[in-house]
Image (tube, grey):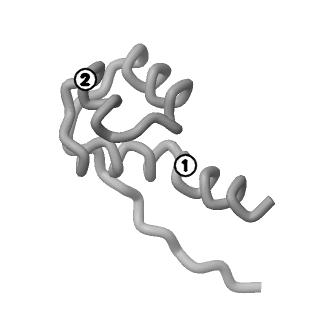
């Protein structure tokens, strides 16, 4: 069985553990709400969500 090789996403910004925790706990908030608390742009937040697997998790929960 062959598996697709996945490219590793590179972090272009430095996220602290506290910021990651906040994003994980509040990943369902809108980007506007996340930008108030986190000092990152929408694109950076999306990239971090991809890196943490939160976007895939959201898709899985929508299917249920």
Residue denoted by label 2: 36
Residue nearest the observer in this picture, 47 or 32: 32
**In the drawing, does residue 60 fall left or right of residue 20?**
right
Question: Which quadrant holds the N terminus?
Answer: bottom right
Front disc: 1 or 2: 2
Give the x, y percent position of residue 9.
36, 56
Q: On residue 15, which mark appears?
A: none
Residue denoted by label 1: 53
**In the drawing, does residue 22 fall left or right of residue 3?**
left
- What residue is shown at x 28% (from left), y 36% (from top)? 32
Label 2 SS: helix
Give the x, y percent position of residue 43.
24, 51
- What residue is shown at x 74% (from left), y 64% (from top)? 63
- What residue is shown at x 37% (from left), y 21% (from top)? 19
Residue nearest the observer in this picture, 2 or 62: 62
Q: Gap between marks 1 and 2, in whole Å? A: 22 Å
Give the x, y percent position of residue 55.
52, 53
Residue nearest the observer in this picture, 12 or 31: 31
- What residue is shown at x 54% (from left), y 46% (from top)? 54
């Amino acid at each position: 069985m062959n598996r697709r090789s996945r490219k590793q996403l590179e972090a272009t910004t430095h996220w602290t553990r506290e910021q990651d925790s906040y994003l994980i706990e509040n990943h369902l908030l809108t980007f506007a709400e996340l930008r108030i608390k986190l000092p990152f742009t929408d694109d950076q937040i999306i990239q971090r969500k991809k890196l943490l697997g939160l976007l895939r998790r959201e898709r899985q929960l929508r299917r249920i």
